[in-house]
Image (tube, rainbow, N blue to C red):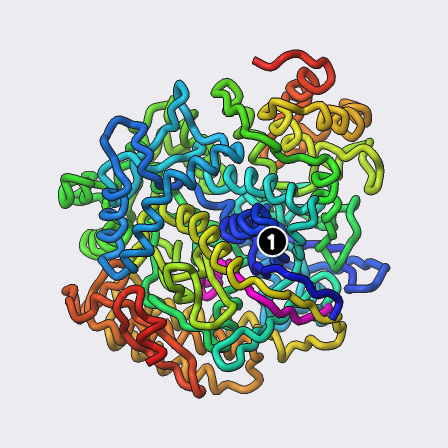
Amino acid sequence: MIYTKKGVNIIGAGLSGLLAAMTLAERGIECAVYSSQPSERAQSVLAEGGINAALDTMGEKDSPDEHYNDTMKGGCYIASEDAVKGLTDNAPDMVKKLCRLGVPFNRDKGRLLLRNFGGQKKKRTAFAKSSTGKIIMTALIDEVRKYENKGLVKRYPHHELIDMTTINGRLESFAVRDSFSGEVFSVTGSTILCTGGLNGFFEGVTTGTTQNTGNAAAIAFDAGVLMSGLEFIQYHPTTIGICGKRMLISEAARGEGGRLYILRDGKPWYFMEDKYPELKNLMPRDVVSREMFFASREYGGEIFLDMTGIKDTIWEKRLSDLREEIISYIHIDPRITPVPVSPGIHFFMGGIYTDNRHKTNIDGLYAAGEAACIYHGANRLGGNSMLGAVYGGMTAALSAAETAGEIRQSKPDGNACNDHMFGSSVMIREQLRDILLSGLGIVRNENELLQSLDKLSLLEKEKNIGATDQKRIRLGKAMILSALKRKESRGAHYRMDFPETSDKYRKQSVALYHNEKIEIDFCHPGDALKEVQK
Amino acid sequence: MRSVLKILRRDRGDNRSHWQCFEYESQSESDTVAAALNSINSRNKLVDINGAPARAIEWEHSCLQKKCGACAMVINGKPCLACGTKLSELGSGCITIQPLKKFPVICDLVVDRSILFENLKRMRAWLENDPYLSEGFQDLAYESSECIQCGCCLEVCPNFYTGGSFFGMSVLPVTMRIISESAEYRELSKLYSKHIYNGCGKSLACKKICPKGIDTEKMLVNANILAVWKRKKR
């Protein structure tokens, strides 16, 4: 062992990881932050539109209760009520805290400005133009730097999680590899996983980063960590394919007046406005993406996001980066010309199951941010992801602080790592992605899901598959099985063969890898730890 | 469009580099260097232009849309982001790709940029108390917060070298913002003078090269007013 001290390990240095580090350091608890790249490269810097909090600065009589109701409704009532209550009640304090850390949110005459976002009738989303994630991250990185200097936060950038061991429901250790030196060492002690969502399973076709491989979730699942809500994948309505990924057109574009249309008999048809006269283009993302899917199927051709009605001052003061990006990557000036868009994979409501205090089923292991499944139910509202990451990171840290014992790090071993241990081949990753995509589209059915499952079983049996790829395929199977077993439509999970929502499934799906089998079950929201232990 | 990518390669733990060329056929006019590297690496059996087997090209990448700074490298002699550099803009012929030169090379195009973060720690760039958050400063605070710590500004700076007391412009946006937001910044002003003001020769090559378009000159002027000329705030 090279050192032993009281503290907490954090894996991941994005928004939730930094919040966790800051929260622990503020209380004088040391933490070690492992991340594959520095915080500046984390996926959180891509978040654009804003962060929700019922601060009621716009004279609309907003309240945390309304934020709670919208979040529960948007998530189709399968998130834990207590967890969401904690999230929405604390949201105003979280945003005020970010202000105190120096985040330059848009303001006007001393008042914090809020903008409209999907699934919410009132203005509730605080923002910094259209790069809110990046701007918040910069302030948090500065704050955590203070604690790095005090020795309370020790960073391990370029360190990747490659293995995890649990014994009798307790976290025994995890292993990380220094991608610069190739050395591997193991670490013990209370640990918070802030490793992001599952977009690495869909390489090249999501709005996320290439840094997110999804390996951390696959490793955790294999080690017996309970997962939940794996069938719920958010397709963001407005994305554009660019080299190697989907580029996001923030929901803020619709919040500020952008309109979706398709050509019907040669004329623009603003289908969202006709079908949903109240929230129009700002219906929850699952609804908008599905409507786009159906409109496109019926009338053919592309769907456009018409932002030509947005005033120049709004572009300049609130959406400047967005316009530059669109011009830079697709050579269209959105002030003048409508932009062709289509839904793309953006967020994973599912992930590591946690209770209201962000504890997983494994003692000593916590999860926060997009890695965790807790607040968003069957569909996340825009503006709630950054809120979930900051509040979740803080809550997980407070829980971990209660049990913080010694953390130990083993001596690095330059020879411990070989391809079999963390090997993942491009070919297998691409096959896995294509199989998952064919089953887990915006609209699903049993036949396609069964076909995907069969293909995964065949892929699993191929020769020379590395350990990491085996784990990835296993978690992929759990995603397909979760979608297969939810024989209803709810939020982002739409089944052509079961188009109605059924009260029978007003539950969270949970997936566990146990005795070399994947078990899928349905539990009352928030009670999975009790029910699974039975 | 067919391109030849001439890449400076180095094995991990080795101190010698060598050039290796790869062919790449663009899929569209907006193909970037990042797309080309990605595509080359996803080939089943990677071979170089001469048909010799090659290992995958190591390079850092993350957002692929100019928001994270991971893929900074030297392309045709100019430091830039691979994801923001279109092949069509580089013209026909051979495109040379090298790692950033002012940082230790780990492998191929991967360099160790930890000096960027170490210098920010040495600058003690953080808030000690609640910030002013004045509305007049909002746009500048936003612009400075957009710095992605890619290191391109250091690469072109005639005065910066790793280990020197001049920290370069990568620490400027954060420092300027913290000084502007703080009520008490005497200590930070001293560090600013020592590690930024005194060493900067005002070539402003950093301003021209910044992939985020951060106006370092404006940042310098603002920081100078407070930290060097000691004019009162607001």
Please tell me which residue lies in front, A235 or A411: A411
Left or right, A79 with respect to A201, comes to: left
- Identify which residue is drawn at 30% across, 40% down: A117
What residue lies at 72% left-to-right and 48% top-to-bottom? B113
Q: How many marks?
A: 1
- Which quarter of the picture shows residue A273? top left
Q: Which residues are magenta?
A: A183-204
Is residue A317 a member of the stretch shown in magenta? no
Image coordinates of residue A193 in percent, x first then y, are: 51, 62
* Residue A335 placement: quadrant: top left
**Whole-percent x, y for residue A396 in the image:** 47, 57
Choose between A488 and A161: the one closer to the eye: A161
Judging by the rendered image, the residue that carries numbered circle 1 is: A29
Kindly tell me whether residue B64 is visible in this rendering. no
Secondary element under disc 1, as helix, strand or loop, is loop
Residue A114 on image: x %, y % = 34, 32
